[in-house]
Structures are given as C-alpha cells and as structure tokens.
Amino acid sequence: MKYLLEKMLLLVFAILSVGDTVKAQQTEIQAVITRHNGDEQIYQLNENDRISFPNDETLVITQNGTDIQIPISEIRKITFDEVLATAENEAKNIGIFPNPADNSFTISGINGFQQMNIYSFDGKLVKCEIIDCGQSIDITELPQGLYYVNINKQNFKLIKL
C-alpha cells in the first residue's frame, strides 16, 4: 500500500503541474512513460492528442482519436518535454532569482501577464498569482522549504530560506 501511495504522489505532481489533461499547443509535447520493469515508451503529442487521468487506476493517452489505456499500477514515472517544433519557445527564457530566496524572488523572461502557481513539495497549491516580467513575488508567508514554481507550463524548483 505504501508503495502505491508513493507512486500516486509522483503522479499527483505531474497532474498538478499540467492539469488534468496535457494538451500540446503550437509545439509538440513528448511524454515518456517509465514502467517499473524499466521499459520506457515515448509518445509524441500534437495539438489534437492528450493524456488524462480519468480515475485513480488508469492513465489514458489519446492519439489520432485512439485511446491507449495504461494501468497506473504499472507506471514508475512520467516525464514531459516540450519539443521545439518551429519558431520560438518563450518558456525557455524564464528565470527565477534569487534562488534560494528569503522573502521574495523575481521572474524574468516572460512576455505579458502570466499565471504563476507555487506548489509545496507535497504537491499542494500554496500561492496563485498573475504576474508580469520583473515583478517581485512576496513569499514571506511561506515556511522554509522546497517549492515548485509553475509558469507557462514550465516548473522551477525554489528554495525558501
């Protein structure tokens, strides 16, 4: 049971960082499913494909209108990489500084207003804000620890001192 709980926690972060469904927009997303036996399967997701978790037992990958079902109990980890398809990828220029941070940090490399979510290490949403480039983010209310900052579908580790 503990093993299944640990596995579910890994999947929770994947769900929290990208939502209930992963859907590519303008670029491809590569999903790599690693099973407990070490086998890896790579799925190239285009704008019409998706990955969803319809229940707590199954992962569904929909490609070209066909559903591929994988039992969650077989999955060790899921990673997502954005594949640079054509033009620019603005998310690659995003930065957080200083890191580690005491009371605030600053976001650089975004154009216009973006949603920023901060998750605790255990996957709980602790702060949600609409931000602009160069804006200072106040984190005085957060206890010391490791956090994940999600901006424009990209995750960054942040250490709060």
Image (tube, helix red, strand yellow):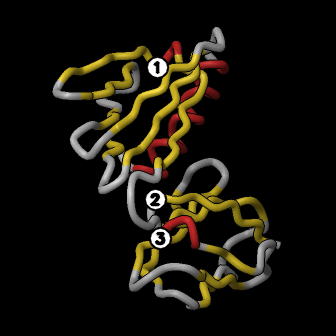
Mark 3 or mark 2: which comes first in sequence? 3
Give whichever of 62, 1 is nearer the camera.
Answer: 62
Badge 1 amino acid: Ile
Mark 1 or mark 2: which comes first in sequence? 1
Label 1 Cα crowd, 10 Å radius (few <14 / some 14-19 / many 20+): many
Residue pictured at 39% horizontal, 83% vertical: 113
Residue 16 image point, x, y percent: 46, 49
Badge 3 amino acid: Glu
Badge 2 amino acid: Lys
User: What secondary structure is found at the residue carrying circle 3?
Assistant: helix
Q: With respect to residue 37, does 11 lie above or below?
A: below
Q: With respect to residue 4, does 132 lie above or below?
A: below
Q: The N terminus lies in which quarter of the figure?
A: top right
Residue pictured at 34% horizontal, 34% vertical: 51
Residue pictured at 39% horizontal, 85% vertical: 112
Image quarter of residue 130: bottom left
Q: Which residue is mark 3?
A: 90
User: What secondary structure is found at the residue carrying circle 1?
Assistant: helix
Q: The C terminus lies in which quarter of the figure?
A: bottom right
Give whichever of 78, 109 is nearer the camera.
Answer: 109
Residue 39 image point, x, y percent: 59, 13
Mark 1 or mark 3: which comes first in sequence? 1
Q: With respect to residue 142, does 51 lie above or below?
A: above
C-alpha separation, residue under disc 3 versus residue under disc 2? 11 Å
Q: How many marks?
A: 3
Q: Which residue is mark 2?
A: 153
C-alpha separation, residue under disc 1 versus residue under disc 3? 33 Å
Label 3 Cα crowd, 10 Å radius (few <14 / some 14-19 / many 20+): few
User: What secondary structure is found at the residue carrying circle 2?
Assistant: loop
Q: With respect to residue 88, does 123 lie above or below?
A: above
Residue pictured at 39% horizontal, 25% vertical: 56
| 26 left or right, relative to 128 | left
